[in-house]
Image: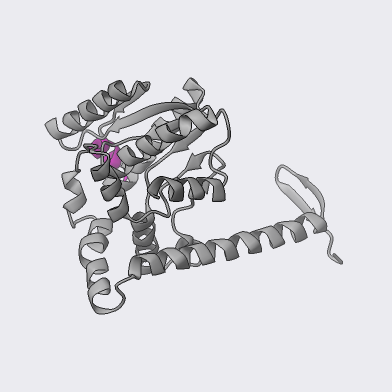
């Protein structure tokens, strides 16, 4: 049932085509490990090529080394090519005046993109799930975001980055791994509430579940999907009208027909 539902998500958002080469970003945590197991089930039917990419953030010393070793061994067991890199995220964040989270995210996506480009991967898959999406919506809401920010984490971005687990709740991912007797590692920084996302995950969402809506995560997820559909529709309508009214378009100039 778990696999069937993930395959439905992949199909719904047209994430993967036959003969695609998919690079999975794997931290060693439950979501990314489950992602690799799901993609492996798809390989035969879709004639996929798979690879695993791991960025060591160098934030937790020996623990970070241990995570990298775990992912390397997982790749070996599954017979998949392994690509890795170590980046001093703390120094990078200081240098670029970014939060640790933001610097880490930028470095991860830069590494995944470069690896995909040089190794010939057509898609880059990450393990974002329904809980992550709900947290993102709530985080953006607290920051005063407009409708676009409340669309959450897109299932597909730039027709290249895909999130096959985006409609799957976290507890079901953990159950799937338990059924498959599949090990994973836990990132201790995920409990550090000095990060806003962790504070939302461990304090705000449980409070909302307990006192307001036990289904708050799926409600926020549903809100994001409704707003994404509206946003896509409005963008599509605006693009059509824009193209209809455009007389000339080149670098630094757009000429519009006033009557149109």
Q: Quadrant of residue 27?
A: top left
Name the dominant secondary structure of the magenta segment: helix
Could you tell me if residue 99 is visible in this image? no
Q: Is residue 167 left or right of residue 66?
A: right
**Front-most of residues 36 and 147:** 36
**Front-most of residues 7 and 120:** 7
Give percent across and percent down for residue 31.
31, 44
Give percent across and percent down for residue 191.
17, 53
Quadrant, the C terminus: bottom right
Q: Is residue 11 left or right of residue 198?
A: right
Q: Is residue 178 left or right of residue 217?
A: left
- 238 relative to 56, above or below: below
Total labels: the figure holds 0
Q: Is residue 124 left or right of residue 180?
A: right
Give percent across and percent down for residue 232.
61, 59
**Which region is colored magenta?**
89-98
Does the magenta run of residues contain 94?
yes
Does the magenta run of residues contain 74?
no
Could you tell me if residue 116 is visible in this image? yes
Chosen colour scheme: one colour
Q: Residue furthest left?
A: 62
Q: Residue at x 65, y 64 (%)?
A: 234
- 221 relative to 37, above or below: below
Q: Residue at x 35, y 42 (%)?
A: 105
Q: Residue furthest right?
A: 259
Q: Residue at x 51, y 67 (%)?
A: 147
Q: Residue furthest bottom?
A: 212
Q: Quadrant of residue 229?
A: bottom right
**Front-most of residues 146 and 45:** 45
Q: Residue at x 35, y 23 (%)?
A: 83
- 47 relative to 249, above or below: above
Give percent across and percent down for residue 50.
44, 27
């Amino acid at each position: 049932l778990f696999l069937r539902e993930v395959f439905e998500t992949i199909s719904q958002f047209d994430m993967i085509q036959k003969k695609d080469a998919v690079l999975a970003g794997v931290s060693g945590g439950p979501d990314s490990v489950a992602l690799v197991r799901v993609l492996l089930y798809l390989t035969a039917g879709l004639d996929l090529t798979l690879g695993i990419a791991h960025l060591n953030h160098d934030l937790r010393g020996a623990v970070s080394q241990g995570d990298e070793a775990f992912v390397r061994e997982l790749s070996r067991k599954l017979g998949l090519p392994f690509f890795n890199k170590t980046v001093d995220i703390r120094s990078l964040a200081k240098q670029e005046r970014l939060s640790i989270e933001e610097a880490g995210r930028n470095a991860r996506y830069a590494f995944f993109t470069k690896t995909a480009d040089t190794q010939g991967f057509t898609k880059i898959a990450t393990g974002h799930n329904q809980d992550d999406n709900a947290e993102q919506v709530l985080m953006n809401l607290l920051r005063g975001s407009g409708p676009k920010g409340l669309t959450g984490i897109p299932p597909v971005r730039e027709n290249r980055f895909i999130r096959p687990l985006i409609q799957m709740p976290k507890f079901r991912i953990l159950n799937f791994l338990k059924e498959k007797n599949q090990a994973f590692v836990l990132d201790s920084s995920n409990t550090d509430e000095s990060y806003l996302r962790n504070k939302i995950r461990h304090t705000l969402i449980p409070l909302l579940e307990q006192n307001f809506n036990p289904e708050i995560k799926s409600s926020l997820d549903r809100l994001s999907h409704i707003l994404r559909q509206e946003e896509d529709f409005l963008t599509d309508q605006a693009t059509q009208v824009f193209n209809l009214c455009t007389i000339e378009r080149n670098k630094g100039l757009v000429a519009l027909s006033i009557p149109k």
